[in-house]
Amino acid sequence: MITLHDNGVFLKNGALCSEAPLSPAEGKQKTLAWSILQAHSVSKDPEQLKIRFDALVSHDITYVGIIQQARASGMQEFPVPYALTNCHNSLCAVGGTINEDDHVFGLSAAKKYGGIYVPANQSVIHSYAREQLAGCGKMILGSDSHTRYGALGTMAVGEGGPELAKQLLKNTWDIPYPKVVLVYLTGAPKRGVGPHDVAISLVKATFASSFVNNCVLEFAGPGAALLPIDFRNGIDVMTTETTCLSSIWETDGEVRSFYEAHQRPGEYKELHPGEFAWYDKYIEIDLSKVEPMIALPFHPSNAWTIREFLDNAPEILAQVEADAQARYPKANVRLTDKIHDGGVWADQGVIAGCAGGLFDNIAEAADILRGGSCGAGYFALDVYPTSIPVSLELTKNGDTAALLESGAILKPSFCGPCFGAGDVPANNGLSLRHTTRNFPNREGSKPSEGQFAGVCLMDARSIAATARNGGKITPATELEYETTRRPYHFDKGIYDKRVYNGYGKPEPDTALILGPNITDWPKMQPLAENLLVELAAVLRDPVTTTDELIPSGETSSYRSNPLRLAEFTLSRREPAYVGRAKAAAEIEARRIKGESPEKLQALLKRAGASADNTQFGSCVFANKPGDGSAREQAASCQKVLGGFANICYAFATKRYRSNCINWGILPFTLDEGAEFPFENGDCVFVPGIRKAVEAGAEDIPAKVLRTDGTEAEILLHIKGLTAEEQEIILDGCLMNYYAKRN
């Protein structure tokens, strides 16, 4: 089904070949990735890219902070189209008025700076970008990790908010030229197999080994041409879960039809790799062999074919129970109770968001349920079309009626079910979702309070088949049904009536409307000569997600108030972290005032250092932090609480490492296999850190001061900082960097 090849390959006229009249160095310039990246880079060095994007997108968890950072750094207007969508906290009630206060701020900012404002429930962020911003050969930067429009010929990247602030200030996104991995598609999917089945299979094959980490995936091959555009979009958006950097696909008549349907025919260009394009690695996917898949908690890569899962459910669910119980000792996890009456039974189905709520997915789900029933038991099915235009077309062609008649519930465009702000299951509930993630707590439960629920990712087709069987998990390939692909008609008039488009027409006299929860960032200090940090969280999990670093869901209501949001840092993974970090920050605050607390005196004496030039704060250790969301709050909340460093063996994603750097958090790594037998309360002293960063040193000797009085030498690394990243860390954070230069 999927074969990984850890060696390079040429592509000649759509066929794989091992030899060519070109060298690999020449051949890599024939890829789509090369042509698009170099066209957007203002660097004179093709191996060190400095990218300027064609458009930006943010949602209402991130855009307030981005705009606040940019305006504090001197921004006068948005230099490129910047869409502010309101799809993440549209329906939240936590915190009173603050969600709608942020929306009002967003509209006032769009007017003042010349932006695009998409009101709540009109569209999810990535649907609007596909419909109105994508274009063949373009590049888009979004403050959401699933910013992926490669199937439309658009290279898109999800990053933390500071990277968008840089673009708003007419600066660049700087990266070394990435490896490019060919994804070669053959065959055609069988009836009942959908894009999530292909995507989950790809994530399963690549995630654990980091096979495509920070690479660009380039999709080609005869199988690609057989896929409808929604199928391609559904695979493409999930490439984020492989931890790749971006994606790009060949374009053809199917893509042309998409742009024509959306009344933007001028955005279409035929894109194909040049003859003898060279790829660093390649992946072969035979689409005809893909089966309906299910991804078990707590990651999209924890996947099986649905048939394998059903045949081995007692063992598989017992393992999930054991994993959940180890993570959440307060919860009484009982997923094996779902096995009864000859099957495995779910409590909920959800089809939603940028992956699930696509027109073709919902139309085929309607075909499966037409004339049937979801039943009157515990199982419920909720469907969220990805935008109002999609919802309108489903209504016009009768699919909405078929779903409602079956007992499904149609809901507005909203990202909530994907990150825990909508459709939270009951305790010990099992939810099947065609959404992007099933990380811990991603469904909204609170295991620290004894609650637990599990999310399994499945394609909309198999979710609909399960719904037709009253919640008995069923692969769609094992259900008889007829389906016909419908033509899609996009009604642009909806957006013309409701979306504010002020790009190129800023109104600088417009006053920003700031509700009481929208606050400025606290003052942050530049890096001192020496650094002394106390371990406030030591996380031994193989991977730590950004959702664990700063939980999503209702906590994000406080996204515009840095101090209140920071109270939730690591709250569901290491509840004692905030108290420890605050205690360290209080010591640093007193040091800045010229005081010398007893604890600091003792530590400095052991380190042989002075309080005059030694910064004191907190630090997080994790094996591999930062998988998942692009939300900058995963780093900014640590900095607000006085965090100055992360120590790890590797960062799970480039975007989390960038977030740390942009917030002045030192991104220390250890050699793979090096021991880190230290615990909460131990301190790490890094002498001469400022000079080391100034000099671009990559090997940083440090000393661990244990609470038991013993000491140990360790070697830390800071690999590959650019000159600008060095300055940002030295200045204390990105905002300080810009303020200093203004």
Image: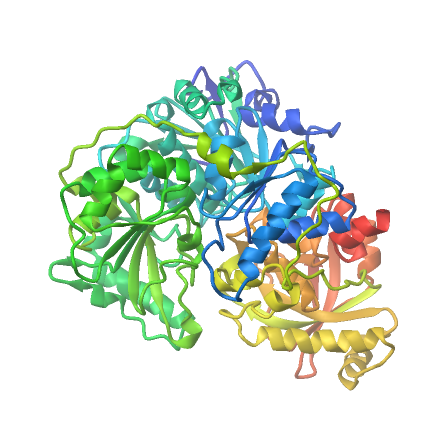
**Toward the viewer: 731 or 667?**
731
**Toward the viewer: 316 or 504?**
504
| Colour convention of the picture | rainbow
The spot of residue 99 in percent (x, y) is 54, 58
The spot of residue 228 in percent (x, y) is 34, 27
User: Which residue shows up at 64% across the image and 33% down it?
Assistant: 503
Q: Is residue 30 left or right of residue 123?
A: right
Q: In this view, does 479 lie above or below 693?
A: above
Q: In this view, does 299 lie to the left or right of 710?
A: left
Point out the residue furthest to the bottom here.
598
The spot of residue 285 in percent (x, y) is 35, 33
The spot of residue 542 in percent (x, y) is 49, 60
User: Which residue shows up at 58% across the image and 27% down it?
Assistant: 138
**Toward the viewer: 674 or 53?**
53
Q: Is residue 24 left or right of residue 400?
A: right
User: Which residue shows up at 47% across the image and 20% down it?
Assistant: 11
The N terminus sits in image quarter: top left
Point out the residue furthest to the left here.
341
Q: Is residue 281 visible?
A: no
Q: Is residue 70 above or below residue 690?
A: above
Q: How many marks?
A: 0
Q: Can residue 357 be seen in this view?
A: yes
> Residue 394 occupies which quadrant of the picture?
top left
User: Which residue shows up at 27% across the image and 62% down it?
Assistant: 317
